[in-house]
Amino acid sequence: MFFKGSRYEKVPTQTFTDASGREIAYKATRFIPATPALVGHQVLAGERLDHVAWSHYRDPERFWRICDANGAMWPEDLLEEGAVIRIPPVAD
């Protein structure tokens, strides 16, 4: 359902049976884990979080690790020019 490396990859899938007996699959709530970071990155004008992820992880789809480390739901929340964002290690 989700690509390998997705933040939802390890979240359990649950099912709900509606009134007509149809089973509906859904992902359980994903709680943001503690994500320590030892490196900082100063945001440049016009920078995108997938580019930051590429420069640190060589994988633009790992931008969500940076979001988790900074308590952000949306990548755009971290892109204020001059801000220093925390970059966690690549491993989960």
Image (cartoon, rainbow, N blue to C red):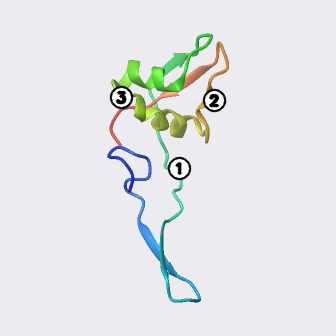
Query: Which residue bears the numbered disc 2?
Result: 76
Q: Residues within 10 Å of mark 3 (few under 14, many from 20)?
A: some
Q: Is residue 84 above or below residue 5?
A: above
Q: How far across and down, in percent of the image, does residue 9 sit?
A: 38, 53
Residue at image location 49% in from the left, 46% down from the top: 34
Residue at image location 47% in from the left, 41% down from the top: 35
Q: Is residue 79 left or right of residue 25?
A: right
Which quadrant would the N terminus be assigned to in this image?
bottom left
* Between discs 3 and 1, the one toward the N terminus: 1
* Between discs 1 and 2, the one toward the N terminus: 1
* Between discs 3 and 2, the one toward the N terminus: 3
Q: Is residue 68 above or below residue 44?
A: below
Label 1: element kind: loop
User: Which of the labelled discs sits on residue 32, or is there none?
Assistant: 1
Q: Residues within 10 Å of mark 1 (few under 14, many from 20)?
A: some
Query: Which residue bears the numbered disc 3?
Result: 59
Residue at image location 50% in from the left, 65% down from the top: 28
Label 3: element kind: loop
Inspect the image, locate mark 2, and give the three-letter code of the amino acid beneath it: Glu
Viewer-side residue, 9 vs 87: 9
Inspect the image, locate mark 3, and give the three-letter code of the amino acid beneath it: Asp
Q: Is residue 15 above or below residue 21?
A: above
